Image (cartoon, rainbow, N blue to C red):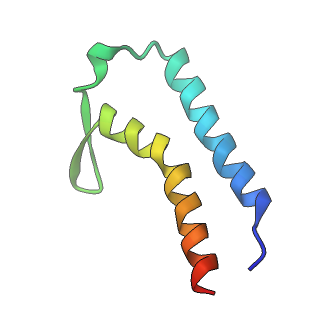
Amino acid sequence: MKTDWSLIREMMSAAIDTCERIEACGYSENDRDASAVLAGQDVSVYEMLVSAWTYPENIRYKIIRSRHDN
């Protein structure tokens, strides 16, 4: 299975861009509890950030498992 490095670069760039935008917005520790409804579920800023930060690692492990299965 060939790795799609372009797709991985796009994903990493999206994560970095998001972090830069959050920083530029003045996000602080006090904002962690702020929440919004997303797809009918209440999601905090903290949960969204943790998900975004762990997504690349989760994808990495998914690629490793897929290669192992093949």
Residue at horizontal 22 percent and vertical 26 percent from the top:
33
Which percent across, then down, holds residue 52? 47, 43
Quadrant of image for the N terminus: bottom right
Which percent across, then down, holds residue 56? 56, 50
Above or below 61: residue 47: above
- Please state which of residues 45 and 51 is positioned toward the viewer in this rendering: 51
- Please state which of residues 64 and 39 is positioned toward the viewer in this rendering: 64
Above or below 55: residue 61: below
Location of residue 43 (image quadrant) = top left
Left or right position of 5 against 21: right
- Please state which of residues 36 and 14 is positioned toward the viewer in this rendering: 14
Quadrant of image for the C terminus: bottom right
Residue at horizontal 76 percent and vertical 66 percent from the top:
4
Above or below 63: residue 40: above
Residue at horizontal 57 percent and vertical 84 percent from the top:
69
Location of residue 3 (image quadrant) = bottom right
Which percent across, then down, holds residue 61? 53, 62
Left or right position of 21 against 43: right
Q: Residue furthest front?
A: 68
Above or below 48: residue 33: above
Left or right position of 22 against 50: right
Residue at horizontal 49 percent and vertical 57 percent from the top:
58
- Please state which of residues 62 and 50 is positioned toward the viewer in this rendering: 62
Which percent across, then down, holds residue 13? 69, 41
Q: Residue furthest bottom?
A: 70
